[in-house]
Image (cartoon, rainbow, N blue to C red):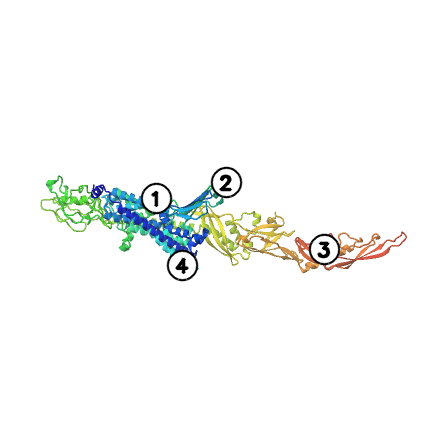
Amino acid sequence: MTPEEITRKLGEVGLVNPLQSLAVGAIAYVGAFLMAIVAVVLSVVAIVVTGLGNPVDSALESVDMDQSEAGSGIGLLLRLPFQLVAMATFGSFDVDGTIEGVSFGAGLRVLPFGITLVMVLLAFYGGRFVQKRQRAGLLGIWTTSILTGVGVALLTVLSALILAARVPAEAGASISLHAAGFDTFFGAFALITLSLALGRLTVRARRSWWPLVADLPAAFKLAVSHALIVTVLGLCGVTVVSTIQALIDGETPPMIYVLLLLPLIGGHVLSFVTGLDMLSAATANIDGAGALSYLMDGMNGTERATMFSLPWYTWLGGLLLGGLALLLASLLWQHQRRIVPHHVVSLGVSWIALPAAYFLGGLVLLVLSQASVAAQLSGGGFFFGDMRIGASVGLAAWTPLLAMMAGVIVELLSRFVAPFLTPFLPSAALSWFRRPLAPAAASVTSGAIGAAGASSAAGPAGSGPLTYSAPLAGAAPDGGFSLAPSAQGIPTDINADGVVEAGTVSAQHAGQAQAHESAPTSADGTAAAGRYATVPIGATAGSLSFAGAGGAGGAGGAAGADGSTAEPGAAGSTTGKISAAAGSLSPKTRKLILAGAVVVGAGIVLVIGLIVTFVVLSNTVFSPEKRVEAYLGAVQAGDAEQALEIAAPNVPTAQQALLTNDIAGAAENRISGFEIVGSEESGSKSATVTAKVTQDGVTTTRTYRVDRSGRTAVVFPDWTMAETEYATLALMIPDGAATLLVNGQEVAVSDLDTSEGYYAPAAVLPGQYTVTLPESSELVAAVESVAYVSADPDDWYELYAAPGYSLSESGMEEVQTQVDALLDECATSTEESPDGCPFRAYAYGVVEDSGSWTIDSYPTVEVEEGEEGWYFGSSSSAGAATYSYQKEGWGSDDEPTDETDESSFSVSGTVTVGEDGTMAVEFDDGWW
């Protein structure tokens, strides 16, 4: 059998030479590889722009590799594009190694969407190119596509495996990095096979039932357009705002890095911008097993953030962008949309196409947003054992449901709102969105339709078989055509023989009617073969009207769909005329439609307004940040009672005695300002709010935890501040003190917590506190103690206040007077050593009751303050006293003699002042 015969035999069953398809697969891989090189270069530029220096040198230093091994580092960069191509086909970049019997592994799974997109587009448009030049049947298309998918998958895996990076290591250790694996193989196979087959299928002629489901591919195209509109407009807004802010701050605009890394993170940018704008949430999960579960205590779990976690101006702009995108998508969807009227399949598809396409688009967003990293260690010995850690980020699992709701909203807007807005827009504003492979318009021109004559059919005039005597109305240049609906509103159908349900097509056009099944569509997709006619959505279907010579319609011409009139038939024959003039709406119907549109539009506006109002109030008036703002506002104003109501300290009531408006409000150097700089929600039950607090020109960063405690006003969240740390001021209380003055306000010592003994702890707000004792006598002057309480908890050590008294001049004089009085009292004694007195005489043989004391000079006392009062002494100025007495003689007959003994002495003792202002002076037991 010759090659020509083999080719002919294969062609009869739809098989073709696969070489052209394999060439497309190779081109798709090469294109992805070149895009990977671009991504690597742009990533290096981004690293250099950040000021990190040469990335190769930095990598060498990080692994402690000298310049002699630099070739390995450069080789890693040269191998990287092959690994990126493998990752672009859903592969995981893995690190595997063994060091001294301990095996470890790590994997990074991130989809470099720019590389994936280039591969898919080259395969898709390459498939179209091949199909136009190599007509293949379904069997040939899928056979060549599967063969090409397998080839590209093998090439991707083998390239990544052969060119795996080998990291230099010590003896007995091996480390390799590559992205080859089963996931890479099946990912590349699926991407190439589906893209190539879909590209080839789009060139084939559409089946006759295609108009019934034509909304499905258009819906997918609109979903992609919707996501691109949101992403591009969102990125433009963020770029403008962030660039202006960065230039004001003198920093590099951050969007430069995003644009440079777009080939790698483009999918994540598209998915997160679109997903968050649809009110979905970004999730981050981290978990560990083995010894890591203990080391990561407090880090395991899932965190979520929504658009409303961003500053208010960001989420407000996001809401406006989301609403604008929904409206624009509805206008595009309504523009030039046509359906087959009165057909249950077409009607059902017209309603479910958008929600289904948006739901599948939400699934795609989930895939694009995923990024994960995992590491594991085995053989780590008794202490470490087997360990594992994993972390991932992506969109929330309910994103497809939100996307489906967006599709429903777009469908409703396109039916009830867009028709009223479209007349005010220029056609060019919407014509750029072209529906793929749309069926031809439903129209029948003025081609004459002859009748077979009365003898060829039984029944009333006009009911016999009809034949076309002119080319089929609405025929496309390549043979495609469509027919207007019948009189009952049912689309005219054509059977396999080209026969219209109401008659038969003449022989010269039977072949044309049959050929529409295989004729290709035009490049712009405006002409599709079909057995079903279409009309603009929302329009009333036309009707088939028949008029014969003997019929009610007479022999006059009937107006065609384009306004022309068909000539009547020849004499003696019955003529039929088909018109597709669209039925006009009655004024009542128009009013009902308008009223319904107004009600629906008002309902949509009301719902959106309620949602926006709820979100705005929930994130402003009823947000956790507002709770912290209220607390800090009370602290700034010195409103301790309000601060206590919002966030009470976890201390006994006795330690809250200083938390009053009078004391806190009179405190100087309170916080002068604050700013909420961040808020991070931990699930839906709690949030951590970060604030910058300014006090006396110093700014301190504080964090506060806020817990959700229910709802207020039925629907809004109610937030309560968790246990808040307060500073503790230690009050040193002098013995006998019953009252303290704090910032001029009396505080009873009995109200304080004196369980510690010599001091009383008290919770206070940031500020300056002046603590003193009440004035009780002119003999003493109160000495105040000032304590400065900082807003920074790190400065809360050694916070104490020690109020006391100091003796006034009158008090000093009173001490001297009382000391002199005590000495005078001592001088009344007849003993040579009076008890409790500072002086004594060295005398013996004293006649009983013969002695007396005389104070020659009084000592000058000095007073010093002690821990529990005052102490006095006269070490620098002693006193003098004389003891006069009679001394017994040596014998019984000897008379007593008069003797004197002079001595100097010093005094010491304590001074106390009672609450009534009286002073008491006591000598010590000894003397100086």
Q: Residue 681 appears at what percent x and percent y?
A: 45, 48
Any part of residue 601 in sight? no
Mark 4 = which residue? Answer: 244
Question: Which residue is outermost to the right?
Answer: 893
Callout 3: helix, strand or loop?
Answer: strand
* Side (left or right) of 172 relative to 407: right
- Whether the residues at callouts 2 and 4 have beta carbons within 8 Å, the answer is no
Mark 2 = which residue? Answer: 382
Q: Residue 266 appears at what percent x and percent y?
A: 36, 51
- Whether the residues at callouts 4 and 1 have beta carbons within 8 Å, the answer is no
Q: Quadrant of the C terminus?
A: bottom right
Nearer-N-terminus badge (2/4): 4
Q: Quadrant of residue 854?
A: bottom right
Disc number placed over residue 908 in the picture, else none: 3
Badge 2 crowding class, 10 Å Cα cut-off, few under 14, some 14 to 19, many 20 or more, is few
Please state which of the two labelled residues, at mark 4 or mark 1, is closer to the viewer: 1
